[in-house]
Amino acid sequence: FQATYCMTEAFAAEKEGSDVWSDAVLMQSKWLLLQTASPAALIRLKSSSSLRSEVQGLNDIYFHHQCHSSLREFLSNKLIESAPTEGLLIQVTTSSHLLTNNEVEYIANGLHMPKPHVSCYLVQEFNTEIDFCNKISSSFKRDSEAVYNTLLIIQCEAGHLYGDLIACARYRVYDECAKAVCSKFFQQGMTHIVFIIQLPPHTTGSSFVGFQGEPWMSVHIDELHSTESEQFTLSDAMNYKISELFVGASHIQRTVSVDDSSENHESLPSEEMECNPPLPHIVPQHQRLYFCIQAAVAKLRDMSNNSDRAVQRIAILHDLIPKCRQSTLATDDCSFYGALICHISRVLLKRDEVVGFDKNWVLNEALDCRRLQQSGTFRNSLTRRLDEVITPIFAAVIAYCDQYSNLNLVKESRDSNSVSKFWLSMFRNSDVILFNYEDMATNPKSDLGGGRVSEEFKCQMPFFWIIKEAVDSMLSSVSNYGGKNVIDTMKQVCSLVSQTPLGEVLGSAPDDDDVLYHCYLHDYVKSVHRTYHKNSDISIQENNLVTDALNQLACGNQFCSVNGHRSLTDRICTLHVVYEIHKAELLWFGQLTQQIPSIVLSMQSSNSPNKMVLHLYAVEKAFEHLEPPIMKDAATLKNWMRDVQMSHNAVDSILLLPTTPSSFSRSRWYMILAIKLFVEDIILKQEGTVIYAKRLYSVLRNHADFHEADTVDMMKKVLNSMDSECRETLKGKPSQLKALRNDCHVFFMEVVSTLCFGYGTPEDRLIKMLIDTVFSEKGDAEVDTKELSYSETTTDSVPVIRSFLLKLLVDQRSEQVKVHLQNYFEKSRRAVSGIDQGLCLLCVQCFEDSTYKEFSLKSLKELANEDIVDILEKAYTVLYNQHTRQFADVSLSYLEKVAYMRYGLSVVAEVLRRQVTVDEEPIVAHRLMQIANKICTDRTLNEFDPFVCTGPSVFLVKLIVRHYGIACLEKIVAKHPWVVPEILQNEGQNQKRDPFVAYGPDYLKVRDAVSGAIYGNLVKELSDVVKAQVGYKVSYLPLSVFKVATLSKASTQPSKQIPRNAVTDFEECIKSQPHLGKELMSIVQTLLLNQQSGPLFQLQVSPQQPSFARELTTIAVHTAIVLSARKDADVLAPFVTMLNNPSALVNAYLPTMPEDNLPDVRKAISGQFYQCPRGHPYLVTECGRPMVTYTCHCGAQIGGHDHVLVSTNTAARTTDETQSGHVLGSPEGRSSTLPERSLSPAGVCILRALMHTALLWASCHIQNAGAGLVQLIKPALKEQDIPEFLLRHLEKDLTLLGRALGRSVDEAVLVLHLVLHDILVKDVPKSDVSRGMRALTQRPDRDNWEALFNRMYIQPFLKDWDQRVGATMQAMLNDQSKDQDRLFFTVYERAKIDEKSMEPHFWIYRPRISLEHLTQNLSSTEDHKRYTLLNSFLQEEPNLRGTQYLPDIAQLQQYLYNKCNGQFDRKDGKMTIGQLIKKEKVEGTRAHLQKLVSSMSKAWELVHERLPEHARLRVDHEYLIPSISLDTELDYLIPTTTGAGVCTSSLVDFLVCTHNSFIGKCRDQDKKWTLQKIPITQLNSCHVVDYEHQLIPIVLSHCHYSLTYGKGQQIEYDFPALEKHILDRFIYGKPHIMLEIPHVVFKEDRYTEAIFGAIRKKVHQETLPREFQEQIVNELRSMHKLKEAIDAVEIILVFVSSGGAKADKNLGEYAERALKMDKQFCSVAQKYCKLKHVVSLWQTISIQFGRQLVLKGQEPFEQLDKGFSAALTESHESELNRVLRSYDIDPLLGLMFEFIETHLRHSQSESEWPLIDTLQAFVDTHGISLGSKYFDQLGEVQLVNNQAVAVWKHIVVYQDRQSRGM
């Protein structure tokens, strides 16, 4: 209509309705509509296929003809350029802020109108219409006769809410206009009226009309305010990418690349893809950096305790970054600002390339309605997006540049300081400091997070860490450093560095400038040599010592003479080379000073002339400190001994370093150790012996070289004198004298083993003296033996060859000792008078143990491909050439080669096993297999006699069968037939082995009768025999049926097939035996038909059935028979139920399942448990309410004050999370067995095997059992998969049982048969078994039943299980002839041999000495109570072994944390660690990271099964992956407190706790042991319990044994010496580890309880008064104002949480002065709020923002887990409405908002928890005061946490309706 009206006047001469007129009307209509459109709507036309082609033209009209850029531009066009003849009526809608007085004046100037001629009013400021009319009437009046125009501007805020008010104001304006026409002023000028109506970007349900029609001109000006010179225009934004806008791109030829068109432009027509004409000018947006400083710094996470660093950083950046774009620094690449712009622009360009962003980013913003609402104007939305892109990159640059407070060193280039100049030289070189977008974002498709800033110390050298990393990487690529090639190494490194851009920057430094070098030296030492002394002065002095020492070495003559001058590059590279050479020395120097800090002060004050041997000088000072206090009492000596123990490892390590010269005197250390042993072994045990320590000290003080005979001789004299004197003083006390002599003997033996042989080879005279001590020659031929002792002892009545001295001699392996070893061997032969079989075997065993120790540090792969091939070839050559069959002809060299071959074949056996094991990586070793084949098939070395088969070939077979089982041998033979000699290859004979022979003669009688009935038709005889069996013996029949009838199906021989008529007759006979019972009768019928397998074909007996599967079948049948026969035994009720009715156990607590033991611990301790922000629990005793604060081991604050808990802490979980049913998960995930409750590892395996077997039988035979088992097993399985699942678990049980007992799986099978035997035959007393214990309905019932079963069956069996197995094995052998199973007889050495024959004795089997064997031996005796630390060590050994990987894991976590800048996008977690490592450009870095991942993988494999139940940070089973590798997703490795990342957090926490716990146990033995504390981030190998490959050699050194053919090996362990050795070698001196690795925060999880907790801790918080809250809400009406305020307040939150401030400090003042925030975000808040109100202010604004989103139908909680999106039911809503009627809603709304945003968002696992309980705990934790009535009434609604969001939204809607009276 308006267009027609306009065109009627313009086309007066034209006929209405003509084509020209119609076209004109259409164009005018478009013009009018375009005039009221928003710029976002115009941009959105690009997404419309019909109007896309018109966008460019409409864009030109909109901005250049209609002038929508600003109100000033629009009014200038309409009032000046158009020259109207009458006053205009204009209605302007806008989304921006309304005009201020200054802006009105700015508009007046632009219109060339005096300020008084322009009036501006806000309609909301008038109370009545009269007031309004009176005020505006002045605009229509003139003060004089002058003619001039006036402008009346009427503004309305939130016009969509005041449509009626605007209409009324417009009506009154009409009145005033009409009055003006009639007045005298009408001819004195025009009055232009402009209504400015503020509207949100998207408005619905409003009475306001945006298009008024004639005479009003309706227009939308999105941004009223004129574009500042520093801001970009919308035209710029529409034509350029963000990267181009940032730097200004008028000079860039703007073409659209093929890549840009691939995705976002796919549907655009071809003309859209053409080049746009270049714009004349683009305002560069790098000045936005100034306004982004606070937001960028707020993204950083400082790892130091410097709370003021963030504010300092802002001050520095404000000095370096200008606010004005015109600053010359922007174009000066030599300035910090210029270089910063260059770096960020490069990252932005790379971002465009990687992410694929193009010029359509403006369209994307226009299409995002939510962002438009939050931003207000479209230009604000674009500016916000620009800042969102720039700020994270800016933050990442700051984070990188301010490591170690590096920004403190920067000054502008005008500064003449060389350090500042070097800083800028480094920073502006983009080849040295390259910021890559892909490196900043782990997932390039996601936005960047913030950054992590490290400040371990304040650096003095600019960017020193860049230089360090670069030189280290070059050094790692140069292989020839150290020793004689030091100079060449230095030259190569210098050359490599010089060729890099970094080398160019370093080369630009003056050669004569020492400042930079010394700055770097300071930083380098600080970074590589960490000190942990409580006294900071000692730390400083130690660093000075190391600095001076490294400087002396690096500036030595050997390096100074290399070049004519020493450039900075040369000096730095030399420093690195020197440190790498002396790294171990400095490492142990630091460890030594940590134990004896006083030596640092001593070294500093003594002015040593040569500090280049710092570690040796420290050792000398340590010797002075450790000088024995001989004149003191025993207590003082004990304290002194402790000091020696703590420093023992460090001193030993320094003395054993290859660089320690042989000339360095060690005698003083030997003296100290000798006195320490004397104190430990004698003085602390025998009163009155201190005086003899003084004597020993006097003879050792000047000469204590225990490699010399004189020293040992003097020591013996002291001991003998003490012996003789004590003989007098202890007359009549023979037991005390004997104890004293025994202690002296122990001391002497320890001195010989530790000091004489432990530090090198003794001199010949000493060895000869020791040999003479154990032998006494009576003549030319006769030799007697004696015990090695300090005194003359009587000779043995029977010659005894002891292994102690022999082992020491063998271990030396030097040519010098071989002569003495031969002498020892010859004398031993003479002593035993030619009967030297035992002697030869003893020598072989000593040589074999020594060989094991020699190669213990090498991996299996290294051994298989290098060493073992060599030693086997050498052994083969000697044994082949010197082959003999008589002991008398054997030489010592021959025995050594026999040991070599035995050890080599043990490695061959392991390699063969790896090649046939599915779940392990096979080792390829072709040469090893060739030499092994040659040895095993050589008829010279092997005897393949039918009667005696022996030699290396048979020994290899023994190793495989006895270690890994017969099934493993079968797999190996299938691949390598040569392994088993042909004479032993008799297929299927293992079926003849009958484990049931353990039942004795009655069973054999029944079995023979069954065989006779089946094959001889002797049915009547069978009936008679069966009737004679009563009680449990009736089960002998089904056992015999299985053995005779069922297993016959495995044979292919016709004679073994059972005739059908025989089966029929047999069945008739069985039916006539009613005393069998229906259960056993059914089993017999099943076995006769070979139907015991059910649907599981693996249990079906057939010729093709593998041997191990047949063993499993035997176990299943045996279990079913025993439990059926003993079904009435109360104690067996759970097993019987599993066998017959597993559905009854759906809710039962099955045996051996892991449990949540935390509730039990808490019940046993009075007090209240809480947990720190990272989930670590702690206890508050007494009343349970905290009174003081402490620091958790992870660094978090715990406890509280005045009974108020620290806000970041929460009440710890008290619920019992033990699961019922079967919860072991996949059998493949079980790698080891832990003790459970009263059960040992072996007991656990036995019970689990019985349980799985019973359930397996039920799954195969009980109808409908599958449905019950589906409910019983967690996680759930398909019913058809259950039998195989249980079978695999049974296999794993047997494997782990064998491992726990140190035996093969075959012997583990026999163990289980023997346990079943005991269950059947043992007549146990009647026990009080409750109904609950029978059904296992509760945890205590399960615990009690396990203890009962363990006490009745398992413990008695394990006391003598070894003998029982041996006896049963012998019975099985006696049950069959040798010819029936030659392999079985040979492997278990039951064939008779000639005692004089040598070969069979050399190749007898010796069980491996393993930790399992040691543990079993210790636990089976009372010694485990005496040697508690050794017992604890062995029990926790797998966990302790994992602690050695802590330094590598800590490094990996630090790398990942740094890589993701402390924040992580959840989408990034799907990337693998391998993919991340591939991004590293340096090969050395990639290899190092792979090593770190390998360490984590090994640690995870060792302990991951323990984490769900035994770790403080619990890992849900869904995240418990079986292994970690390079293919593992990143989210499993990045340390977090929720989700998959808790795996690595829990792993580290568990290992640290294991380390600290065991060190604490050792400290409990000595309360005066002062533990040092080391942060985990600074761990190295000398701090952890690292004994990999070292423990077994130590165990071998402390065991004594004898070896006899057919009887196996008898081992005796020296438990006290072993415990002492382990403590001295691995434990003493180890520190307490502080867990300080930071957890990564997901980007969407940035604001958590921890942030708000830190604020509340540092600044006391109060609730903002209600009146201020209302004023703030009224001021911030629009969405974009609220969003701006939230952004500003969140920046303030971050700084307050990190730095703190005074609670009463004005918030506005803090923002302006401290944070340099110029922009006003809320005048009320900035004027009246204090920092103590900052949390309440955040709540107020955020809640109002969320409330508006809800009322608009949008989601208030973005990115919240979908698990919390459950809706409310109608009944819930009705109940809530009832409750809310009596509530003050605002406090509840605020509480729930903070609860959802800071707690629930990060607690996905709590989605099903009761909402009220969780909310109550949240309130209690944070000390929030809220009436109990809230929880009492809300608790009636029965809500859960996943409904929390729905509840909050419902409350908002309810409150809105109440306010509107609905």
Image: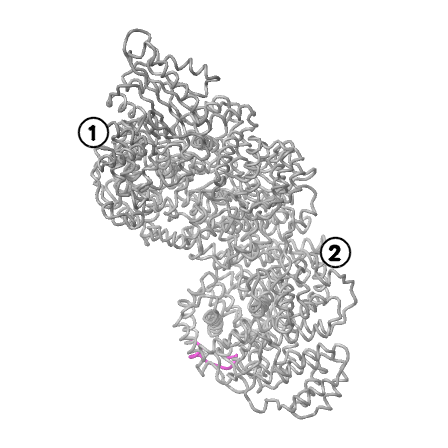
Residue at x 59%, y 81% (from the top left corner): 1390
For this view, does 1840 lie left or right of residue 758?
right
Residue 633, horizontal then vertical, whole percent: 65, 43
Which comes sooner in the sequence, label 2 or label 1? 1
What's the magenta region?
A: 878-888
Check disc 2 and report the residue beneath it. Answer: 733
Q: Which mark is residue 696?
A: none
**Quarter occupied by the N terminus:** top left
Q: Is residue 490 visible?
A: yes
Per the image, is 1131 magenta?
no
Tell me where residue 1717 sits by quadrant: top left
Q: Amino acid at mark 2?
A: Lys
Residue 978, horizontal then vertical, whole percent: 45, 80
For marks 2 and 1, give the CA distance. Answer: 145 Å
Per the image, is 879 magenta?
yes
Q: Which mark is residue 13?
A: 1
Q: Nearer the viewer, residue 361 or 1228?
A: 361
Residue at x 42%, y 38% (from the top left corner): 370
Q: Nearer the viewer, residue 1853 or 705?
A: 1853
Secondary structure of the residue carrying numbered label 1: loop
